[in-house]
Image (tube, helix red, strand yellow):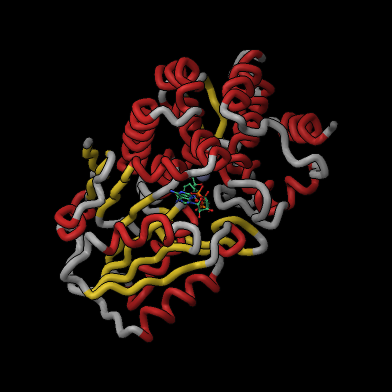
């Protein structure tokens, strides 16, 4: 087992990574009161709920089960969790536990941030994507029909328990979606990790445990570093958004159905790399290098066929990184070195959107 720390002063917390880290002692160490509410969904509950409850002997345990799917990451789900907390008389010393993927984690964290002005929560992520990204760093929230993650809060968990054995039941397509965010870390901050990913792509796609554990540890370490530097995304943290400006537009356009977040981010990263080439930062072969790696991970590298440049612009116009009406993009000034900038040629953006929407 490996333990990393997200160092945020008196709100620092551990990330436990390993097979079987979900133990009674470890959970109890991060639960302040007697009451616990597990938030999970209809897919994960039959797989892991009993296992988790078995580790919570001595606590009063309630469960809220959400519908499964990105399209349910809305204020309605927050209302459901809060309704359950109130009807079951949970007070300010209760602890919420998010058992599931990023959707469950984002909803649970946001509910925790606002229930009675804030209660503790623990992340128990069960998808690769949630283990390498969403469970760490305290971005919580839900979608709005006008845009992705438009309602939310920065609110850090007490602990993150990454039980890597849960990946055994994860569908291959979801594993690939998680790998997109793993590749992101290589691209934004760690060229050696990017080389390692290229050398180990096949092992990762075939879910080889040692390769996955290395990828999870490296990803969490990278995310922790960035979050420690800029918890509230005043600047550098936005590099974690590489590919998301385009990716969120794809998810919104698809009404949060059919395309997975990681798949949309994969396409978005290719488009961001293409933009970086057009801006003169990267050599043209960078696009092929990134596309090849993502394709080997069974990820898409082009947007949905029917999308137009205007469709992209409609969603990009409400991106949270925008300042004073200007779009800001995460670009690569070198492989493994991201910047956040509004200093790019508008024509380069238009040409990139046209290139990726022409079939
Ligand atoms: N807060 C953040 O910093 C952050 C970072 C990245 C992504 N996100 C958000 O995370 C969400 C995507 O997360 P995700 O990819 O985990 O999707 P998800 O939560 O929808 O989970 C994917 C699917 O896998 C199922 N599942 C979960 N664990 C399983 C397991 N062990 N075995 C079998 N099936 C399992 C889920 O029920 C779901 O059907 C998006 O909403 C995205 O915006 C947030
Ligand atoms: O933690 C962050 O910061 C990220 O941007 C991580 C992203 O992978 C994640 O998808 C996040 O939810 C995006 O947040 P948003 O603020 O761009 O909506
Ligand atoms: Zn993401």
Q: In this view, does 197 lie above or below 14?
A: above
Q: Left or right of 271: which side holds 91?
A: left
The answer to whether any part of residue 150 appears in the image is no
> 291 or 34: which is nearer to us?
34
Name which residue lies at 58% across and 57% down. Answer: 70
Name which residue lies at 36% across and 61% down. Answer: 49
The answer to whether any part of residue 204 appears in the image is yes
User: Percent from the top left, x then y, of residue 312?
Assistant: 73, 45
> 34 or 255: which is nearer to us?
34
Name which residue lies at 76% across and 32% down. Answer: 356
> 230 or 127: which is nearer to us?
127
Q: Left or right of 88: which side holds 347?
A: right
User: Percent from the top left, x then y, of residue 334?
Assistant: 51, 19
User: Percent from the top left, x then y, of residue 308?
Assistant: 81, 43
Q: Is residue 269 above or below residue 91?
A: above
Screen quadrant of the C terminus = top right
Screen quadrant of the N terminus = top left
- Residue 244 sits in which quadrant? top right
> 111 or 326: which is nearer to us?
111
User: Percent from the top left, x then y, of residue 165?
Assistant: 34, 42
Count the marks: how many? 0
Name which residue lies at 49% across and 26% down. Answer: 187
């Amino acid at each position: 087992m490996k333990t990393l720390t997200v160092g945020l002063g008196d709100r620092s917390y551990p990330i436990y990574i390993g097979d079987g880290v979900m133990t009674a002692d470890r959970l109890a160490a991060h639960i302040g009161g007697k009451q616990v509410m597990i938030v999970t969904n209809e897919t994960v509950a039959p797989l892991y709920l009993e296992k988790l409850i078995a580790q919570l002997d001595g606590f009063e345990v309630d469960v809220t089960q959400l519908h499964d799917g990105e399209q349910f990451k809305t204020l309605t789900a927050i209302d459901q969790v809060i309704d359950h907390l109130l009807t079951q008389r949970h007070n300010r010393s209760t602890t919420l536990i998010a058992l599931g993927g990023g959707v469950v984690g984002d909803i649970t964290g946001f509910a925790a941030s606002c229930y009675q002005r804030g209660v503790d929560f623990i992340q128990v992520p069960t998808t690769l994507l949630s283990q390498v990204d969403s469970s760490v760093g305290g971005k919580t929230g839900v979608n709005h029909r006008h845009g992705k993650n438009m309602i939310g809060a920065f609110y850090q968990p007490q602990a993150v328990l990454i039980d890597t054995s849960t990946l055994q039941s994860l569908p291959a397509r979801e594993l690939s979606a998680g790998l997109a965010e793993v590749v992101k870390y290589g691209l934004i901050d760690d060229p050696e990790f990017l080389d390692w990913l290229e050398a180990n792509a096949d092992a990762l796609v075939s879910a080889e445990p040692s390769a996955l554990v290395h990828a999870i540890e490296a990803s969490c370490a990278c995310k922790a570093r960035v979050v420690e530097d800029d918890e509230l995304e005043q600047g550098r943290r936005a590099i974690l958004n590489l590919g998301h400006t385009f990716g969120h537009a794809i998810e919104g356009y698809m009404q949060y159905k059919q395309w997975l977040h990681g798949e949309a981010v994969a396409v978005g990263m290719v488009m961001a790399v293409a933009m970086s080439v057009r801006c003169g930062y990267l050599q043209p072969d960078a696009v092929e290098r990134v596309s090849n790696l993502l394709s080997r991970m069974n990820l898409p590298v082009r947007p949905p066929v029917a999308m137009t440049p205007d469709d992209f612009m409609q969603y990009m116009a409400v991106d949270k990184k925008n300042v004073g009406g200007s779009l800001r993009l995460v670009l690569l000034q070198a492989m493994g070195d991201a910047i956040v900038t509004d200093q790019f040629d508008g024509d380069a953006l238009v040409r990139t959107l046209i290139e990726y929407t022409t079939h």
